[in-house]
Image (cartoon, rainbow, N blue to C red):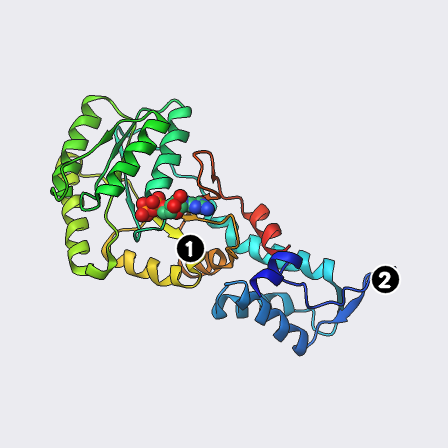
Amino acid sequence: PAAQVARTGMLGRLFSSTPTIAEPRRELDDVMLEELEEMLIQADMGVETALRVTANIAEGRMGRRVSATELKELLADEIARIMTPVAKPLPLYPKRPQVVLVVGVNGSGKTTTIGKLASQFKAAGKNVVIAAGDTFRAAAVEQLQVWGRRAGVPVMTAPEGADPASLAFDAMIRAEAEGADLLMIDTAGRLQNRQDLMEELAKIVRVIRKKDPSAPHNTLLVLDATTGQNALSQVETFQKLADVSGLVMTKLDGTARGGVLVALADRFGLPIHAIGVGEQIDDLDAFDAREFARALVG
Ligand code: GDP
């Protein structure tokens, strides 16, 4: 089904592919709606959202004959309507430093996203500091240092196993002293140890607030599009662990179907600040609702 969607768009099988002079039309009836629903679910949109989108398309149109082009437009409009309110770049505040806590499960793309964001903000003339808060994974710290060098941004580290909260505190002091505009703090993503993780994040927040009661100003949750519907439960979990203020969806290049973003927007309404579209430093795009809707519909 994923390959099918990739080849022909999610409406591929709804209309005959035989080329004719006039575009074929089909009556919008229960059978067609059911097929449409099934396709939206296969595109990772989730049952609830697929049902709602289908119902909205059906409203006032039952019995009408529609072409694939018309149906695509209706669908793209519905998706864009859901996505437009959440398409918001990371807000920048006059507060110095603006503290951005970055959370998410290991492998979701936190390190990469921090590197890409740092590079974009640096290019925009912002003074950025990164804190490698996942002190338990030496590889993650090294990786973040690599990204820091690429972006031309200092990365604060602590010895393996050190307390991430004290690193965060030191990073606050350094960022303040340097007049940094932004401090991005990476965190651990060991979900198998939920209680520990919750305490660790809470402690980081507590310590940051000692320096600045208004911090963290953003808590970014990084999600991997290839995990499909699992992304929904990750949002629920991380909302319990931290005060998630916005999302970045990675790995929307390749075969990920992306429909899960519609489900996320529909269910949580959290801002989508950016999308990852590759492994290189420039592969982070602003989220454009209409463009996304059009690409998803195919
Ligand atoms: P972390 O464990 O959450 O810090 O995840 P990493 O940043 O180390 O990313 C895990 C893997 O996903 C790495 O191999 C990255 O290159 C890859 N990755 C991250 N973002 C993207 C993306 O947008 N597209 C693709 N194709 N790969 C990505």
- Side (left or right) of 67 relative to 286: right
Where residue 156 appears, as percent x and y from the top left, is: 21, 31
Badge 2 marks a residue whose secondary structure is loop
Between 53 and 168, the residue placed more toward the observer is 168
Where residue 212 appears, as percent x and y from the top left, is: 18, 35
* Residue shown at the point (31%, 26%) measured from the top left: 153
In the picture, the quarter occupied by the C terminus is: bottom right
Between disc 1 and disc 2, the foreground one is 2
- Side (left or right) of 239 relative to 254: left
Question: Circle 1 is placed at which residue position?
Answer: 269
Q: Which mark is residue 254?
A: none
Taking the view exactly as shown, the residue that stands out farthest to the right is 21
| Vertical order, 13 against 279 (above or below) | below
For badge 2, the amino acid type reads Thr
Label 1 or label 2, whichever comes before in sequence order: 2
Residue 220 visible in rendering: no
